[in-house]
Amino acid sequence: MIVGVLGDGQLARMLALAGHPLGLQFIVLSPVPNSCAASVAEQICARFDDEAALRLIAQRADVVTWEFENVPARAVQYLSQHVPVLPPPAALAASQDRLSEKRLFRDLDIPTAAFAPVESLTDLETAAATIGWPAVLKMRMHGYDGKGQATLRRSEDLRPAWAALGGVPAIVEALVPFEREVSVIAVRARNGDMAFYPLVTNTHRDGILRVSISGQNDPLQAQANEYARRLLERLDYVGILALELFAVQGELLANEFAPRVHNSGHWTIEGAETSQFENHLRAILGFPLGSTAAIGHSAMVNLIGDVPDPGQMLSVPGVHLHLYGKERRPGRKLGHVTLREMGQPGLHASLQRLLALLPSAEAT
Ligand code: AMP
């Protein structure tokens, strides 16, 4: 069977790597030649709205999925007329617009920070007055990894923040004084079966994920699963979905969801019975889901902007190194390391050793 993937980054690469033992082949579509998925998948190098390229994928692939949210809706619409496209395109549309995403949460009784849509500087002034300080202004579309966002601490911040975002449709939301950020990676099969991975605690800096630590028996697991379940069922979802949440005073507030495999689920490759990548493929191909149970204790560290000496990293106990074959560039995700240990003290010791190898600006 052939799986078509829109996008050619590390997520497409890890999907292909997970699919090879199952005998699957992959075609990735991307406008950039020699992408990081190209060494493990056939690449069609074309724009996402190139109709001939989309037709080719539709003819050859048994199912099409994506690895990033900002796939043009028209491409997905075109493909879905010719080949099964999963997760359902409506889930992609809901996640592409922060306002529709937040409204969906509200509709499902999933708590969020207070938010309001903003179309003009006047709207922003009114919304900030209602929501209070501090707040955060976010572009509705095309924002990721903290890009297209500005923190608002006082009324003097409003005009420059609005100008910095370029006056595009936005939302403003209360800045949550969270104790920690968590995510739940959930999966739903074509027959409606669902499974949830252990809750992950995430550390971000400058809006980019740095470290994820997977928990066991997290007191917030049941609540997170319940919110993810509501989303999966409402969207008639098939595949992996990641729901990112803020934990504050023992409660969860939803921040956003990603209708795809997710960086905070990379630890599952070695740290769970079935990885998020394999379970995404199982789901979209109509196979039974695999167990999401953890094997031991795991942490994942992103390698951002630079890669420490591989030999030194590999000398850390419990280490599993993944390099994506990308050129070094500041702020770019070049790889990740998963640490898996049978006991928590061992995990903690390995994590400290690994973090000490990162450039000091990266050590969290
Ligand atoms: P996002 O692009 O919405 O995932 O935001 C990136 C990161 O910015 C989040 O992971 C948080 O660390 C931070 N952030 C975003 N929105 C808020 C908020 N309303 N309150 C506090 N922190 C936030």
Image (tube, rainbow, N blue to C red):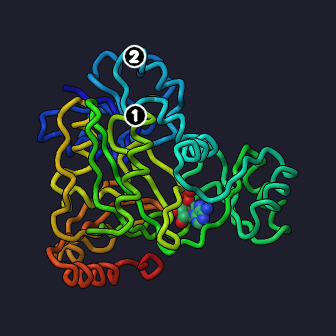
**Rendered image quadrant of residue 135:** bottom right
- Residue identified by numbered label 2: 55
Is 145 located above or below residue 307 in the figure?
above
Report the quarter where the C terminus lies: bottom left
- The residue carrying mark 1 is 6
Q: Residue at x 54, y 52 (%)?
A: 144
Inspect this view and state whether residue 39 appears. Answer: no
Asked whether the residues under the numbered discs 2 and 1 touch, taking CB atoms below 8 Å apart as contact, a structural biologist would say no
Q: Say which amino acid is labelled 1.
A: Leu
- Pick the front one: 55 or 143: 143
Q: Could you say which quadrant of the image residue 86 lies in?
A: top left
| Rendered image quadrant of residue 294 | bottom left
From this view, report whether residue 208 is shown above or below residue 238: below
Image coordinates for residue 356, horizontal then vertical, percent:
34, 84
Q: Is mark 2 on a helix, strand or loop?
A: helix
Residue drawn at the location 75% of the way across and 56% of the way down? 164
**Ligand 1, image quadrant it occupies:** bottom right
Answer left or right for 58 relative to 341.
right
The numbered mark, 2 or 1, whose residue comes first in the sequence reads 1
23 w.r.t. 327: above or below: above
Q: Is mark 1 on a helix, strand or loop?
A: strand
> Going by the image, does 50 lie left or right of 228?
right
